Structure formats: structure tokens, C-alpha cells
Amino acid sequence: MAWRYCGNQIKLWRIQAGISREQLGKEANYEYDSVKSMEQGRRKPTVRLLQVADEMCGAHGLLLAAQDYLKPEKYPARTQDFMAAEEAAVALHSYGALLIPGLLQTEAYARALIGGHCPPLDDETVDERVAARLQRQEKLTRRPPVLFSFVIYEAALRTVVGGPEVMKPQLHHLARTGALRNVSVQVLRAGPASLAGLSGPYVLLETSEHEQYAYVEGQETGALYTDPGKLSALAQRHGMIRMQALGTEESARFIEKVAEEL
């Protein structure tokens, strides 16, 4: 909607000033179809087009002011409710099946993941989402401390995201973070005993007001639950997963062993 509104404003100012799309495109070094796409909101209006249109149409900064509303969202729309709940959480219990949880990712690992998104994201969106993911990690060392427990399925450790040069530091970072007093990291080994973990990742949260949430994410979907029945089922499953996982010290040794094998 921001793209459409901004594009429509460019069009209205252009028409009022008696300037054609061809003229605007020539001055901004864009093809006619590119200007048309931006005016119709099918493509994000660029800062360059805003600057040129603002000057040519005599908008005196009114068009250029739109650039603040065209910055990419920090998080995909499906995760924004979860991010608000995570920010308010005083206890967080996470199970990751195929990827290292976002709160434990290095910048290089996060960039490899987000940069490899399909369909591809533009560079500005990648930078914004990587920065937002790293900013979330400040919660790990916040005062008063928040309680974190992470269980990570073995496959996530052995999926070499970004190549060994990215994955090896990521595994070392994982082991270091697990040494924090308010953070526990456990590994669920692949095998017959890990069946409870095969249904996919999720996060359980509790706020200072003792509100309970569960967040379950899939491809292009994400749901934040407060239903007591769903919360109970996921809490029971998480208890089983934690029992089947390696202890924290054994998990740290296993993570370092996987890192050395890279």
C-alpha cells in the first residue's frame, strides 16, 4: 500500500506540473515502463525517482519525504505478532529442527539465510532484516535476565549454511552462547528416540503477566497461539524433546565436535 500511495502521489504531482512519464524517466534515467510500474505501485519507487520528481514538479520536499515510508519491514508480516510477544517474554523455550534459531545466529549465518531467500529479496531488505535479527539478540544479555532454553535437532548443526567458513564460527558461537547462565542449549540427536521432534519447530513464551504463547512457523506461514489445548500439547511435546536431548554439557561438546569436522 505504501508503494501504491507513493507512486500515485508521484503521478498526481507529475500531471499537475504538466510533465510526461517520458520526461520524468529521461531525467531520472529510467525507462517509461519502469516509471509506470513505480507509479502504479507494482515496483517500489526509488529514492532517485523521488528526488528527480520532487525537483521537476516543484514539490519542495513533499515527495522526497515519502522515502521514510518506503523502507522495508524489519520482519515478514507473518512474524510480527510473534516478535512483539518475544520482546515481552521473560521465559522462552525454543525447538529448532532444521536451522539455528534466529536468537543464536551469527551475522554471517543470518545473511546467508536471508540473502538466499526464494524468491530473492532486494539488498536493502536483506540488510534491514539481518540488522533486525541481530538487534533481537540483545535480549540474551538484558537485565533483568530472561530465561532461554533451546533444543536444536542434529540436522540443523550439520546443514552447512553459507559453507564451512560460515558454519564453523556459527557452531562455536552456539557453544559460547549456551554457556551464559540464563541460556541452555541442548542437541537432539537424530535417531529412533527423536520422533517427538520430527513435527517441526516451535517456540513457547511466557510474559511477566504470565501470558502464555506458542509460535509455530512453516513455509510462508506463521501462527501465534494462545489456545490452552494447543499450548498444553506443545508443552508436553517440548518436555519429551528435552528429555530425549543431550544434556547441556554433553551438547556443548557435541557442537564443538561437529565444528571441528568441518
Image: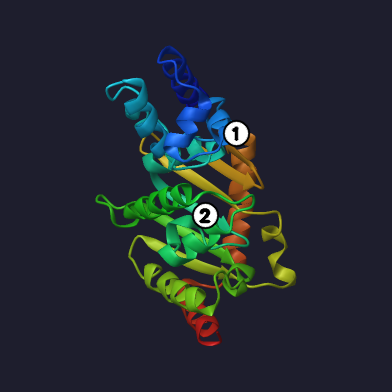
x 47%, y 35%: residue:
26
Residue 159, compared with residue 64, is above or below; it is below
Per the model, the C-alpha gap separating discs 2 and 1 is 47 Å
Q: Which residue is mark 2?
A: 94
Find residue 148 and report its horizontal and vertical position in percent: 42, 56
* Residue found at x 39% / y 39%: 48
Q: Percent from the top left, x then y, of residue 75?
A: 48, 42
Q: Which image quarter: residue 19?
A: top left
**CB contact under 8 Å: marks 2 and 1:** no
Label 2 is placed on what type of residue? Ser
Give the vertical position of 262 relative to 230 (above or below): below
Crowd around label 2: few <14 · some 14–19 · many ≥20 (10 Å): many
Q: Quadrant of the C terminus?
A: bottom right
Q: Nearer the viewer, residue 97 or 170?
A: 170
User: From where the camera sits, is residue 106 visible?
Assistant: no
Which residue is most to the top?
16
The vertical placement of 140 against 234, above or below, is below
Q: Residue at x 32, y 27 (%)?
A: 55
Looking at the rendered structure, the kind of residue marked 1 is Asp
What crowding class fits label 1: few (fewer than 14 Cα within 10 Å), some (14-19), or many (20 or more)? few
Residue 32 falls in which quadrant of the image? Answer: top right
Mark earlier in primary sequence (2, 1): 1
Q: Position of residue 104 (x, y in %)?
A: 44, 62
Between 13 and 218, the one nearer to me in the picture? 13
Along the line of sight, the residue nearer the viewer: 34 or 188:
34
Q: Which residue is mark 1?
A: 33
Horizontal side of residue 126 vs 241, given as left or right = left
Give the mark toward the camera: 2 or 1.
1
Q: Secondary structure beneath disc 2? A: strand
Residue 118, given in percent of the width and then of the height, sits at: 64, 52
**Towards the viewer: 183 or 29:** 29
| Residue under the point 55% across and 75% down | 163
